[in-house]
Amino acid sequence: MAEVLVYVDHVDGAVRKPTLELLTLARRIGEPVAVALGAGAEATAATLAEHGAVKVLTADAPEFADYLVVPKVDALQAAHAAVSPAAVLVPSSAEGKEIAARLAVRIESGIITDAVDLEAGDEGPVATQSVFAAAYTTKSRISKGTPVITVKPNSAPVEAAPAAGAVEALSVSFSEQATGTKVTSRTPRESTGRPELTEAAIVVSGGRGVNGAENFAIIEALADSLGAAVGASRAAVDAGWYPHSNQVGQTGKSVSPQLYVASGISGAIQHRAGMQTSKTIVAVNKDAEAPIFDLVDYGVVGDLFEVVPQLTEEVKSR
Ligand code: FAD
């Protein structure tokens, strides 16, 4: 069976959920071979093996320490040369997409970004994407080189599938570019304690209807009762009520959670572009004609200042 390289996103050996989702998809098209880099790379092996990795290629070097992408591209290129895989899968984070794009150029392959599903095809893996502001769903495959595919978080379930997960050291020689950039300072963002927006299983978003920065406390309370991330429409962000890093949509982040709750959001095409692939969509809007109701699974016509706190209390009571 063909091997499929899976780039491992981890923090000091703790594997992040999008990588486990990639292993589920990789098993549909071949045998997953994981590539884990940097401090804690070997510590990822047990988790990766539990989720189907037949092999874990590891490398650690100071070059991997500073979130620079080129050293990681060098390593993936070395893994590609060593394994000759049927495909390379990378999580669709900002970093993952840069790594994947650079790798595709290096190995002269085509790339598909932001896939939301993946299946085996007669002529190679077939990826599903949601394109043109989510107006179309396309299926495509790469016809040149080894397919490099980035997959959006929450696109597949995490499945236990015990495999050997044998650890092997990957030999990497760094390119000139890898040593040509240095991180000179770092400013950590204050943590809210909430999940990262693009990876969260549940996202609770507020729009212009929230009517003020202080009122976002209502949205946050519902989010916290559900263990969710908080999102915002551009109208709310432009008004200065919530940070741009939380904006969902065409010019914000693209999310694909199990549950998306939109409150006081009309459902403009540019907002839909960032959330339409969510598995279940719930909206609270006082206007029964709001376009958001065209795409919801459950809709509440009502005032969010009444409905959302009731919802929060109900969730908390369970
Ligand atoms: P509105 O459209 O004003 O809707 C507010 C809604 O709240 C209304 O439906 C109203 O009925 C409801 N409401 C009001 N009060 C209450 C209440 N008390 N209870 C319940 N409901 C209430 N938008 C994005 O979101 N993300 C993007 O990335 C993005 N990118 C864009 C890029 C471009 C190039 C352009 C041109 C636009 C972009 N937009 C984006 C903007 C987009 O077109 C809309 O203007 C925006 O999404 C509207 O935000 P909203 O739904 O919060 O506000």
Image: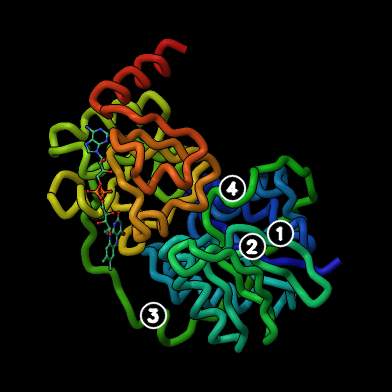
Mark 3 secondary-structure assignment: helix
Q: Earlier in the sequence, mark 3 or mark 4?
A: 4
Q: In the rendered structure, which disc, 4 or 1, sits on the residue that comes first in sequence?
A: 1
The x and y percentages for residue 34 are 66, 60
Residue located beneath label 4 in the image = 43
Say which label, 2 or 1, has the lower sequence index.
2
For the question of whether residue 59 can be seen, the reply is no
What residue is rendered at 67% in x and 79% in y? Answer: 142
Kindly report the distance in space between the C-alpha atoms of the residues bearing marks 1 and 3. 32 Å
Q: Distance between the residues labelled 2 and 1?
A: 7 Å
Disc 2 or disc 3, which is closer to the eye? 2
User: Which mark sits nearer the N-terminus, 2 or 4?
Assistant: 2
Discs 2/1, front: 1
Q: Are marks 2 and 3 in contact (CB under 8 Å)?
A: no
Number of other residues with Cα within 10 Å of mark 1, as a class: few under 14, some 14 to 19, many 20 or more? many
Cα separation, mark 4 vs mark 1, equals 21 Å
Q: Name the residue beneath numbered marker 3.
A: 179
Write down the residue under mark 1: 26
Label 4 is placed on what type of residue? Answer: Ala
Mark 2 or 3, nearer chain start: 2
Q: Provide the residue designation for mark 2.
A: 6
Label 4 or label 1, whichever lies nearer to me, is 1
Q: Residues under labels 2 and 4: Cα distance?
A: 16 Å
